[in-house]
């Protein structure tokens, strides 16, 4: 393992002086732009910043428990994570199935998966969310009895569901939003999986079939293990994109970070502070995930070598 790591490190090219100079220039330019914007706000708009109110909307003092409890912004952030995790899980399942169908030899599965991908990718996200949200809320939610879940479930089950989904009175809205986001992201995951399968050399299929394996066995034991390693990096990027795309469901009154930040901005009238705070939160989360996934990708490259 140590020899492999050394081999990978030796292959990395040193950063040139020109590339470093370009990086430094970009960083200095970004800092200068931010400083200029702050200067314009202070001198032209004569805006007085108010940051002291933010902590009380992140944490609040609970008199009954005699302890701090999450307030609006922290609850909204927790809902954003719930939406992203559940949507990515469901989208990955749908995307893998559709991706395999996209590479099938039969015309019917390829038509179904192609129709799904083209329908989602060529429709504006806001329109897609509205159309499917109202359809899911009016048809699927009553069909599966989700509205009655908060009434018929036991207290212990409700406690677990509130941790996994959020407030019980919003179960139907949250589940509808999760399904909408999952369907939207599944179209892009489908293309990622299709590209991963197509990247496998055709000789791998022929070698598996020459050993007497069926098409399904070749796909399961030969193709998919190799394709999964190749699609993990773009899937990680899609998860980061999903965290940002989750703000779309604020349009259908799901109380995630963007929705609750809007409520706080309207009630306090501190618009700049709230949206700068929300932008910083999204940036920190997405950048941290990018660093983590980048590290995992490098580790995966080491194991492949």
Image (spheres, grey):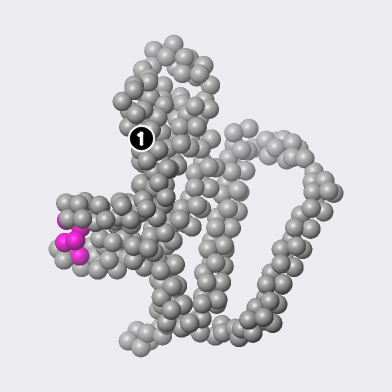
Quadrant showing the N terminus: top right
Q: Is residue 191 left or right of residue 10?
A: left
The picture places residue 47, in percent across and down from the top left corner, at: 61, 83
For label 1, the SS is helix
For the point 51% across and 69% down, the residue is 278
Q: Which residue is mark 1?
A: 115
Q: Is residue 63 left or right of residue 230?
A: left
Q: Give the magenta part as a residue range.
A: 144-150
Q: Is residue 180 magenta?
A: no
For the point 23% across and 62% down, the residue is 157
For the point 45% across and 32% down, the residue is 194
The vertical placement of 291 against 232, above or below, is below
Most extreme residue toward the right is 17
The picture places residue 81, in percent across and down from the top left corner, at: 43, 60
Most common secondary structure along the magenta stretch? helix
Quadrant showing the C terminus: top right
């Amino acid at each position: 393992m140590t020899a492999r790591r050394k081999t990978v490190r030796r292959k990395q090219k040193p950063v040139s002086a020109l590339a470093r100079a370009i990086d430094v220039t970009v960083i200095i330019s970004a800092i200068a732009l931010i400083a200029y914007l702050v200067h314009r706000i202070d001198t032209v708009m004569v805006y007085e910043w108010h940051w002291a109110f933010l902590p009380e909307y992140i944490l609040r003092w609970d008199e009954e428990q005699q302890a701090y409890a999450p307030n609006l912004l922290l609850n909204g952030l927790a809902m954003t994570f719930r939406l992203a995790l559940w949507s990515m899980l469901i989208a990955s399942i749908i995307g893998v199935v559709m991706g395999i169908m996209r590479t099938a030899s039969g015309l019917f599965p390829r038509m179904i998966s192609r129709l799904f991908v083209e329908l989602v990718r060529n429709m504006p996200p806001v329109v897609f969310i509205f159309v499917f949200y109202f359809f899911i809320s009016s048809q699927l939610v009553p069909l599966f009895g989700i509205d009655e879940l908060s009434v018929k479930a036991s207290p212990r089950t409700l406690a677990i569901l509130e941790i996994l989904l959020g407030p019980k009175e919003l179960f139907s809205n949250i589940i509808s939003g999760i399904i909408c986001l999952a369907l939207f992201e599944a179209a892009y995951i489908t293309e990622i999986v299709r590209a991963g399968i197509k990247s496998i050399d055709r000789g791998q299929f022929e070698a598996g079939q020459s050993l007497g394996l069926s098409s399904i066995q070749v796909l399961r034991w030969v193709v998919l293990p190799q394709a999964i390693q190749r699609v993990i990096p773009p899937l990680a990027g899609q998860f980061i994109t999903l965290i940002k795309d989750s703000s779309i469901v604020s349009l259908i009154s799901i109380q995630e970070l963007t929705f609750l930040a809007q409520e706080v901005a309207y009630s306090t009238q501190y618009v700049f502070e709230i949206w700068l705070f929300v932008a910083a939160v999204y940036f920190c989360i997405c950048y941290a995930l990018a660093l983590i996934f980048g590290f995992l990708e490098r580790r995966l490259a080491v194991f492949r070598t």
